[in-house]
Amino acid sequence: MSRTTKIAVLVSGGGTNLQALIDAEKRGELGAGKISLVLASKPGVYALERAAQNGIDSVVLPRKDYADIAAYSKALAETLTEAGIDLVVLAGFLTIFDEQVYAAFPNKILNVHPALIPSFCGKGFYGLHVHEAALEKGVKVSGATVHIVIPECDAGPIVLQKAVEVKQDDTPETLQRRIMEEAEWKILPEAVRLFCDGKIEVEDNKVYIK
C-alpha cells in the first residue's frame, strides 16, 4: 500500500477550486492524495464551511495577526510542517509569503492560474483582472495553467495547461466561469494526482511527467 500524500489547500475566499479537489478525492481521482488541511488567510470565508461539511481539519491564519511577511511566513511554514503536509495547493490564496515557505516545501507548492502562462500573468494579474486583460487583447483562446510555485510570481515550472475558447460576447465573468469549469477544475485535480503518484520530475525549471 503506497503512503498517503497529505495535502493542504490554502484559501482566501469561496473555495471553488477546493470543492473541485474534494469532489475529485471522493471519486478516487487524487491517487495517493488526501486533503488533510484547509488553511484560510481570513476567518469566515466559505471555503472553511466546505472543509467542515467534508470533515477536513481547518485552521485560520490571519495575515493581520502578524507584524510582517516574515513573521507570517514562519507561522505558515510551521503550521504546514507540524501537520505533516507533503503537498501545498494554492486555491485562490491571496496572501504573500516569503522564502521560508519555499524552503520548507521545495517544488511541493502548486498553484492554478486562470490563463495560459506566460500570457496574462505576474504582478496584478489575479481574479477578474486576468480575464479583463485577455478580452481587452482580443485573444481567441485563453485557459488555465497549473504550475509549481517559486518566489517569482507565476514563473514556476508548468505542470499542465488547458485551452478554453473565448467567445465574442464574453464578459470577464462569463470567461472566468468557463475557464473554471472547463479547465481549472479539471487540470488542478489531475496535477495533484500526478504529484501524489510521484509522476512529476522538475529539471531546469521544466516539469517532466513520468
Image: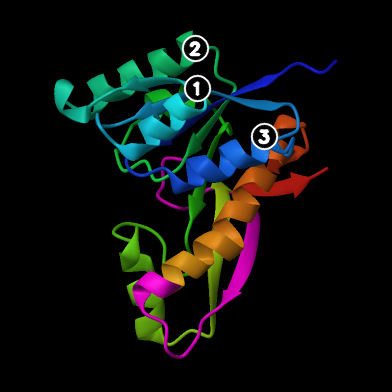
Residue sitting at 61 percent across and 41 percent down? 23
Residue sitting at 42 percent across and 43 percent down? 15
Magenta extent: 150-174
Q: Position of residue 155 (x, y in %)?
A: 48, 52
Quick one: SS at disc 1? loop
Quick one: SS at disc 2? loop
Q: Earlier in the sequence, mark 2 or mark 3?
A: 3
Depth check, front residue: 180 or 161: 180
Q: Earlier in the sequence, mark 1 or mark 2?
A: 1
Circle 3 packing at 10 Å, graded few (<14), some (14-19), many (20+), is: few
Q: Looking at the image, can residue 57 be seen?
A: yes
Q: Is residue 151 on the magenta stretch? A: yes
* Label placed on residue 56: 1
Q: Position of residue 117 (x, y in %)?
A: 52, 63
Circle 2 packing at 10 Å, graded few (<14), some (14-19), many (20+), is: few
* Label placed on residue 194: none
Amino acid on which the number 2 mark rests in the picture: Ala
Using residue 114 as the reference point, say whether residue 172 is left or right of it: left
Q: Earlier in the sequence, mark 1 or mark 3?
A: 3
Residue sitting at 58 percent across and 36 percent down? 22
Depth check, front residue: 93 or 60: 60
* Label placed on residue 83: 2
Amino acid on which the number 1 mark rests in the picture: Ile
Marks 2 and 3 close (CB-CB < 8 Å) = no
